[in-house]
Image (cartoon, rainbow, N blue to C red):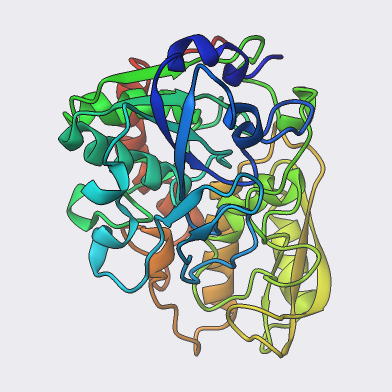
Amino acid sequence: MRLGLERLFDVLCGKRVGFIANHTSVAADLTHLGALLHGRDDVRLDRFLAPEHGLWGDVYAGDHVENAADPLTGLPVHSLYDRTKPGLDAFKPTPEMLAGFDVLLFDLQDVGARYYTYISTLELAMEAATGAGIAVVVLDRPNPIGGVVVDGDVSSESARTFTAIHPLPVQHGMTVGELARLFNAERRIGCELTVIEMEGWRRGMFFDETGLPWVAPSPNMPSLAAAIVYTCGNLVGANLSVGLGTTKPFEYAGAPWVDPFAYAGALNERRLPGVRFRPAYFHVHYGPYAGQRCAGVQLHVSDRRGFLACQTAAHMTTLARELYPAHSWPQDPKVGRHRIPASGETAGEVIASWQPDLARFREIRARYVLYAD
């Protein structure tokens, strides 16, 4: 297994480079790519552009990222998560950020979910670079939950947001390099795009099968286990906590008013593939019900290849609505979904409603994949 960055330097030789990077932009030996590029005679690393969570991954979800100087290289860091600006302009490189260099380099570790914002940063950066006449080079990295499963509802173009930048299913089954190719063609960006592919990665691989070290992509993504359930945890509705701030983010689901034994029992009766539910209590430190004791379930994935996160979420949400009809279930704008399940709608009906759009997306996706099963 080799990352694209090992074949990077010939592409950048003699160029002035801007780098969309964070703490995950590391080689297999954990050396940061900024350190590898800085000071080379054949490459001029000019500045960093930092996505959500900042250059060194210490900023919590939704918090403003400041402009700063990188403590490692001393180079300027420009924020691509400026919450003082309206709309998508808060997350798009400005002409001033792109001025003076030849290549925009992108190297961020994604987690395989539509609403994880690094892929939105990529799409917006490609638009901005094209407008500035700058080439984009994407260093491809593994999809940590594999590139086989494609599932969940497909977002709507009419509801384009930073967490739904393009009509993708919740679990898209693509790498960032493959998504860059899809964005460039399907959105007609016209970017001068180079994707430096990995060697040795296969679609069926989970991250721990690559031999690469896990670097938490964001503060609430501490482990591969969290990434595997992330597309489930973030879909159970805005009215349940998913354990943010605990040691097991996204592995929990609950609220102060849930009966954990009834909820776990009813979910286990459904015999969902690859997962069991344990009654659990947990104290939430971030997000809904922060500072409160919640009750609910912990997901224990027993067969990660059989586990279907989005379909599990459909069962969890519809069952919670059935058990607790007095509680409202607002749309969570962070996940960029078409809708939440309607009152009385079954999990089977929810899952069936996804299938026409999923079928169309799979046909489109097939044009841009780079790696074999």
Quadrant holding the N terminus:
top right
Q: Position of residue 205 (x, y in %)?
A: 69, 23
Q: Vertical placement of 13 versus 111: above or below?
A: above
Q: Position of residue 154 (x, y in %)?
A: 34, 45
Q: Quadrant of the rendered structure where residue 25 is? A: top right
Residue 35 at x, y percent in the picture: 65, 34
Depth check: give the residue in front, 81 or 245: 81
Q: State the residue in front, 356 or 368.
A: 368
Q: Residue at x 71, y 52 (%)?
A: 226
Q: Residue at x 63, y 15 (%)?
A: 6
Question: Which of 15 and 143 lies nearest the eye of the viewer?
Answer: 15
Picture quadrant of residue 130: top left
The quadrant of the rendering that contains the C terminus is top right
Residue 111 position by quadrant: top right
Q: Is 116 left or right of 90, judged from the image as shown? A: right
Residue 239: x and y in percent read 53, 79
Residue ID at (32%, 20%): 193
